[in-house]
Amino acid sequence: MEKEYKILGNYIRLVDERNKNLAVTKLLGVSISKKFIPSIANIVGTDLSNYKIVRTGQFAYGPVTSRNGEKISIAYLDEEDCIISSSYTVFEVENKEELDPEYLMLWFSRPEFDRYARYKSHGSVREIFDWNELCMVELPVPDIEKQRKIVKAYKTITDRIDLKQKINDNLEATLNAVYKEFFTVASPDELPYGWKIAPFSEIASITMGQSPEGDDCNTSGFGKALLNGPTEFGFYSPSPVQWTTTVKKHCVEGDLLFCVRGSTTGRMNWANQSYAIGRGLAAIHHKTTPNLNWFIKAMIDNNLQEILAAATGSTFPNVGKDLLNGFKVIIPDDTTLQKFGSKGYAISRLITANAKEIDTLLVFQKTLLSKLTI
């Protein structure tokens, strides 16, 4: 054990309080994003008296890890009491003057903890990270005031991210409303003079990604940064984890990156530099004016459900180049576009500034979590 590291089992205890009198009705589950979420289980006719109660300030986790990839479902309840399935393990910190529960949750939030939990999981049919293994976790436990300072710093970042996300949600809604105000028509016969309904390819250029050979890829930063899909996406721009010495397709700075394969089809990010792009992505930009790339995104947002509905694939959608090029959009005359641009561009710049700040704050979050080991 490293110096200053402690055994977690010395600070926590099991809790097994059942909902015998049905006093608690709020049913939640625990997600792999380490949050309590509304349960999607069908509980019609279910006896909820055997469900476990989680009190405010307690933890719950799902010990089965084999179906969660590299994540373990564990969360801290900072809201009103709830009930959860009896398959979860509930526990609490015994002495909050020795170990701050929110500090402990930060430790659980580290990707290294997920990897540790998977490594320590065992079982022939389902792999389990059981209570005994959790108790054997080693972690640094500085004095309580230092723990609280770390928690406060993390909360400050989180609150700022939440604020910026709410602002951007409102701005996105406003931009969408402005777009519809300008470009919604009752029928094709009522298009203003100079407008037309045409394929998306008349206003946008699309580059479909093509993955390089595996042997040409590396994680050491040699060659050109490579994007394969949304796993590298940030709130605004991606962060590459791979590089390639052979570039088959690439995007340029300012391109809209659009996911074209799998369950994340339709997710978007902005290229903050030139990247090699794999087959899971398409790079899209306005044909003549880079400053109108945000207008291209507004077009896609306004037509996204139709694009996804037309996508092929029996299990997950797959958006091909022909589909992207061919979906119909309303293309206004230049005068109307410039008039809309004075409003839309201003809103889009605010969205961009907030999104970039969120990406920066997310880096600060990761840095803070990484320093918990020191």
Image (cartoon, rainbow, N blue to C red):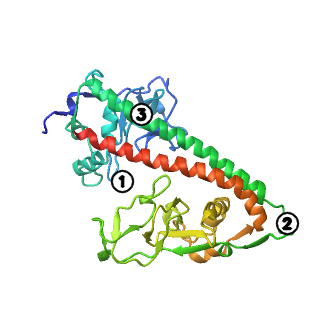
Q: Position of residue 276 (x, y in %)?
A: 42, 71
Q: Amino acid at mark 1?
A: Arg
Mark 2 and mark 1: Cα distance apart in space: 55 Å
For disc 3, the marked residue is: 155
Which residue is located at x 24 percent, y 54 percent? 124
| Quarter location, residue 278 | bottom left
In the depicted structure, whether residue 15 falls above or below residue 278? above
Pick whichever of labels 3 and 1 is earlier in the sequence. 1
Q: Are marks 3 and 2 in contact (CB under 8 Å)?
A: no
Q: Secondary structure at mark 3?
A: helix
Residue assigned mark 1: 67
Residue 176 in view (yes/no): yes
Residue receiving disc 2: 192
Looking at the rendered structure, the kind of residue marked 2 is Pro
User: Percent from the top left, x then y, of residue 121?
Assistant: 25, 49
Report how far apart the C-alphas of labels 3 and 2 lie in the structure: 51 Å
Screen quadrant of the C terminus: top left
User: Three-letter amino acid code at disc 3?
Assistant: Lys
**Neighbour tally class for label 2: few under 14, some 14-19, many 20 plus, Cα within 10 Å:** few
